[in-house]
Amino acid sequence: ITTQMTEAIKVRGVHRRFQLGDQTVHALNDINLDITQGEYISVMGPSGSGKSTLLNMLGLLDAPDEGQYWLAGKDTVPMSEEERAGYRRDHIGFVFQSYHLVPRLSARENMELPMVLAGIPPAERRKRLEPVIKRLGLTERADHKPEQLSGGQRQRVAMSRAIIRNPQAFLFDEPLSNLDAALRVHMRKEIRALHDRLHATSVYVTHDQIEAMTMADHVVVMRDGVIEQQG
Ligand code: ADP
Ligand code: MG
């Protein structure tokens, strides 16, 4: 049997432009990027340099105006909006700075939501959920609503929700910027350990240089929609 290495993420000549009044913002300007399965990359760059636009495209929340993007060998450009949503739900774990939890649901229900949407039966949901809750130290807080949780706990709930379906790709958009410094150090170790254990493919956007340098296998630096440096 021959196994062929496919790039987890392969981006070629991608452009994304936004129209703001009579001005065109070139948010992504000829982006090329290769990430292999198991790799952890950080994306750095000043505010407005295109980091979130890139991440949204990688996470199929948005599509390029021009260029090509293969995710796990699958050409994503021809996908319909519906296919895109389905693929995102099944294969992508997103973690945002502002958590994006559903306020009226408990921590447990928030984590369960992707499995409910995927039609996984309750017994199976519970079986998968309990070890994740335990591992992230959320046992005591599982039945609380997001507003009753600290920032760190909310971000752990968001992380649990992102990993619960074993996605192929983890996408983090400045997930720790709302937390205090001590907690950031702790949680970035947690995130890296999670990545290693799951042999995931992770893209981690941050404006914190130390965070980028200490966590990632490679750092990509963006400026004005261009990848300026890759190392
Ligand atoms: P970053 O995450 O690095 O701060 P973004 O990717 O959010 O940067 O934005 C890159 C550029 O694209 C910015 O100039 C921003 O104003 C613009 N932009 C991003 N999203 C939109 C949008 N939906 N509509 C108009 N302009 C946008
Ligand atoms: Mg951003």
Image: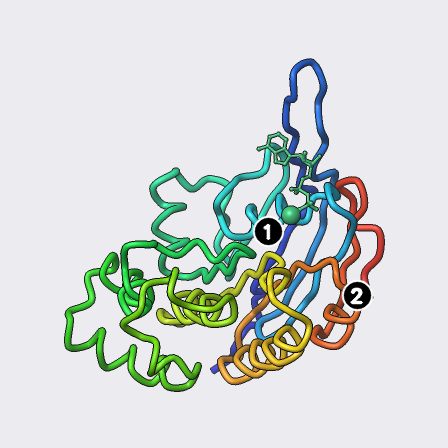
Mark 1 Cβ inside 8 Å of ligand 1: yes
The kind of secondary structure element at disc 2 is: helix
Residue 80 at what x, y percent from top left?
A: 39, 38
Residue found at x 57% / y 72%: 37
- In-front residue for pair 104/100: 104
Residue 177 at what x, y percent from top left?
A: 64, 61
Q: Quadrant of residue 142?
A: bottom left
Residue carrying label 1: 55
Residue 55 at what x, y percent from top left?
A: 59, 51
Residue found at x 67% / y 36%: 15
Residue found at x 75% / y 63%: 208
Mark toward the viewer: 1 or 2: 2
In the depicted structure, whether residue 134 falls above or below residue 83 = below
In the depicted structure, whether residue 35 falls above or below residue 57 = below
- As measured in the structure, the alpha-carbon distance from the residue carrying label 1 to the one carrying label 2 is 18 Å
- Position of 172 with respect to 109 (left or right) is right
Residue found at x 39% / y 60%: 147
Number of residue marks: 2
At label 1, counting other C-alpha atoms closer than 10 Å, the crowd grade (few under 14, some 14-19, many 20 or more) is many
At label 2, counting other C-alpha atoms closer than 10 Å, the crowd grade (few under 14, some 14-19, many 20 or more) is few
Residue carrying label 2: 209
Ligand 1, seen in the image, is in the quarter at top right
Q: Are marks 1 and 2 in contact (CB under 8 Å)?
A: no
